[in-house]
Amino acid sequence: MEHSERALKDIKKLESFLKKFKSLRLNEKYPSIFDHCLNYFKDSKHYFEKKDYFSSLGCSNYAYGMLESLLFLEKGKYFHELE
């Protein structure tokens, strides 16, 4: 898999996770963290458009990790276990 494909896959994964997090209303309990993750999502898309796939991956994965940690603390499950 090329770097661009991997970065795009992670952007889509993060976008899906942000929607799931919001549907569980955890964004209301953790608004500051959710906002930071939204900013990382925007940054990831920005870097992708600039063809800086390494930075794009970093932003996506950092946000994903924060959200998944909160989900695990709240629900005792990881993202892939909710699908």
Image: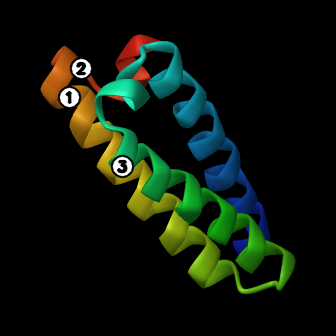
Closest to the observer, 78 or 24: 24
Mark 2 residue type: Lys
- State left or right for residue 67 relative to residue 47: left
In the rendered structure, the answer to whether residue 81 lies left or right of residue 36 reads: left
Q: What mark, if any, has residue 18 been given in the picture?
A: none
* Residue drawn at 42 percent across, 14 percent down: 24
Instruction: Please tell me how crowded label 1 is: few (under 14), some (14-19), or many (20+) other residues with Cα within 10 Å.
Output: few
Q: What element carries label 2?
A: loop
Q: In this view, does 57 lie above or below 41?
A: below
Position of residue 69 relative to residue 66, above or below, is above
Front disc: 3 or 2: 3
Q: On the rendered structure, is 37 left or right of 1?
A: left
Q: How crowded is mark 3: few (under 14 residues within 10 Å), some or many (20 or more)?
A: few
* Earlier residue among tags 1 and 3: 3
Reading the image, the residue beneath label 1 is 72
Mark 3 near mark 2, Cβ–Cβ under 8 Å?
no
The answer for how far apart the CA atoms under marks 2 and 1 are is 5 Å
- 14 relative position to 73: left or right: right
Q: Find numbered disc 3 in the image and state the secondary structure of the residue it sits on.
A: helix
Q: Which of marks 3 and 2 is nearer the N terminus?
A: 3
Q: Which residue is drawn at 21% across and 15% down?
A: 75
- Residue farthest to the right, as pictured: 49
Q: What residue type is labelled 3?
A: Ser
Whether pointer 2 and pointer 1 mark residues with C-beta atoms closer than 8 Å, the reply is yes
Q: Name the residue under label 3.
A: 32
Percent x, y of residue 6: 67, 62
In the picture, the disc for residue 77 is: 2
Task: State whether residue 29 is above or below residue 40.
Answer: above
Which dot, 1 or 3, sits closer to the camera?
3
Instruction: Residue 23 in the image: state x and y as whole percent.
Output: 52, 14
